[in-house]
Image (cartoon, rainbow, N blue to C red):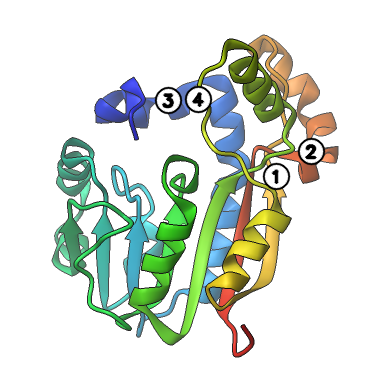
Amino acid sequence: MSTPAYNNPVAYDARKAKPIEAYLETLWKPIFADIAKTYIHTSDVVADFGCGTLAHIALMSHVQKIYAVDANKIMLEFGLQKLSAHDRAIVTPLCESATHTSIPSNSCSIIWSVGLTEYTDIDQLFKEMTRVATPMATLLIQFPNKYNIVHMAIQLAHFLRGTASKKYRSISEMRRIAHRYGWRVEKAVTTGFYTPLPAILIPILDPMWRLFSSFGNNTFLVLQKSTER
């Protein structure tokens, strides 16, 4: 990632204090917790692609081992400092590109990735995640929703300026890419709809925003290895 905040781990973590980010956190935090509880077990070995400041390690601290992959050394080192002694013992940090890791092939039963797909080559990412996955692995991945109103506005603004935008994708696009690499969608969750308005209005608009969750800012997919290609 090349955004200024992603080179400042303190600012990156502090963004959650902003009103919109805090609102989104209240929506996604229970979803992450439920998915982790359902799909991540004590016998698992996890690969966290794009781990950043290791914000999600607590969700998987009961597993055997975690490969924490991020190309940004500053973010990775900052995240490691926050870990408990137990979590640090099970985490293997890898300051590497997510599309070319040193994780052994067929070694990870859980693949986790949040906030990465928009910044990297999606085909190369899926190729690498598939390489390290065991035959019965589960892939848990969150990506920015192409049809979220804010994302559509951002894409339009970049188009008009002739500049590059982050890559937003629809569920159907992600489903096709996943199928190409032998994965099938078991579950899809989309939430986090909002419009950029003054923070004072968030409590008032919150109930209405939740009615439009299918157009939310992000989608989380649960993917299983498929026997059909």
Q: Are marks 2 and 4 in contact (CB under 8 Å)?
A: no
Q: Secondary structure at mark 1?
A: strand
Q: CA distance from mark 4 to mark 1?
A: 25 Å
Residue at 69% of width from left, 61% of height from top? Answer: 188
Q: Residues within 10 Å of mark 3 (few under 14, many from 20)?
A: some
Residue at 46% of width from left, 44% of height from top? Answer: 115
Residue at 69% of width from left, 48% of height from top? Answer: 170
Q: Position of residue 104 (x, y in %)?
A: 23, 77
Q: Position of residue 26 (x, y in %)?
A: 59, 40
Which residue in the protein does label 4 denote? Answer: 164
For the C terminus, which image quadrant?
Answer: bottom right
- Mark number displayed over residue 191: 1
Q: CA distance from mark 3 to mark 1?
A: 19 Å
Question: What kind of residue is marked 4?
Answer: Ala
Question: What kind of residue is marked 2?
Answer: Arg
Whether residue 39 is visible, yes or no, is yes
Sequence-wise, the earlier of marks 3 and 2 is 3
The front one of 226 and 83 is 226
Q: Secondary structure at mark 2?
A: helix
Q: Report the side of 188 relative to 139 (left or right).
A: right
Sequence-wise, the earlier of marks 4 and 3 is 3
State which mark lies toward you, 4 or 1: 4
- Mark number displayed over residue 210: 2
State which mark lies toward you, 4 or 3: 4
Sequence-wise, the earlier of marks 2 and 1 is 1
Which residue in the protein does label 3 denote? Answer: 15
Q: Quadrant of residue 87?
A: bottom left
Question: What kind of residue is marked 1?
Answer: Thr
- Residue farthest front in this picture: 162
